[in-house]
Amino acid sequence: MSSVQDQIECRQCGYQEADYIYHCRVGEDTTTCRLHESWTVKRDQAGTRCGWTHEIDEGFGALWYSRTGRSEFAGHFLHSAQELADAETWLRERLAKGEVDPHASYLTHWNKETKQVELVIGEFYEWPNGQ
């Protein structure tokens, strides 16, 4: 199956580099940032297309980190208060042990009332120009 990947503006927080993936064969797409949105084909018992399912999962926050001495990043999107608490514990422990880069690792929380992304730990990492 082929797919097209791009970066678009997140409908929830306005972040300019949310990930967008379009799956060509089935015509489904997904947007992932602090919001998860997808259009999925519904099929009947015979496997015939019979409509679409549109889901929007308002994100709770995100954990981004880079292990010390490495250039790759990992990101995890959070969808509950428990996931946020677990991510905060994990990141604080890794920072204390020096296992993650403190200049490229952070945890955010989506504040529904203010409709703002708030930092819990760290600071937003700005990609160097050209990357």
Image: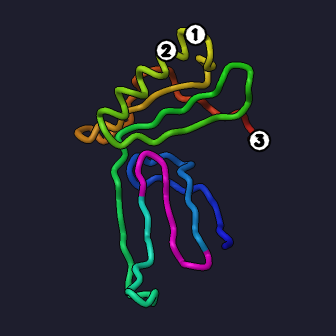
Q: In terms of sequence position, does the residue under pointer 2 or pointer 3 come before the other?
A: 2
Say which mark, if any, is on residue 13: none
* Distance between the alpha carbons at the discs numbered 3 and 1: 31 Å
> Magenta span covers which residues?
24-36
* Distance between the alpha carbons at the discs numbered 2 and 3: 32 Å
Which residue is found at the position 61% from the left and 11% from the top? Answer: 98
Q: Is residue 127 magenta?
A: no
Which residue is found at the position 73% from the left and 30% from the top? Answer: 71
Q: Where is residue 82 shown, x and y percent of the image? A: 31, 32
Q: Nearer the viewer, residue 56 or 86?
A: 86
- Where the C terminus falls, by quadrant? top right
Q: Is residue 34 magenta?
A: yes
60 lies above or below 86: below
Q: In terms of sequence position, does the residue under pointer 3 or pointer 1 come before the other?
A: 1
Give yes or no for contact between labels 1 and 2 (Cβ–Cβ under 8 Å). yes
Q: Which residue is mark 3?
A: 130
Residue type at the position of mark 2: Glu
Q: Which residue is mark 2?
A: 93
Residue type at the position of mark 1: Lys
Which residue is found at the position 26% from the left and 38% from the top? Answer: 114
122 lies above or below 34: above
SS for tag 1? helix
Q: Where is residue 64 shown, x and y percent of the image? A: 54, 32
Q: Residue furthest right?
A: 130
Q: Which residue is mark 1?
A: 97
The 10 Å Cα crowd at callout 2, few under 14, some 14 to 19, many 20 or more, is: few
- Where the N terminus falls, by quadrant? bottom right
Give yes or no for contact between labels 2 and 3 (Cβ–Cβ under 8 Å). no
Question: Which quadrant of the view contains residue 101?
Answer: top right
Give the mark toward the camera: 3 or 1: 1
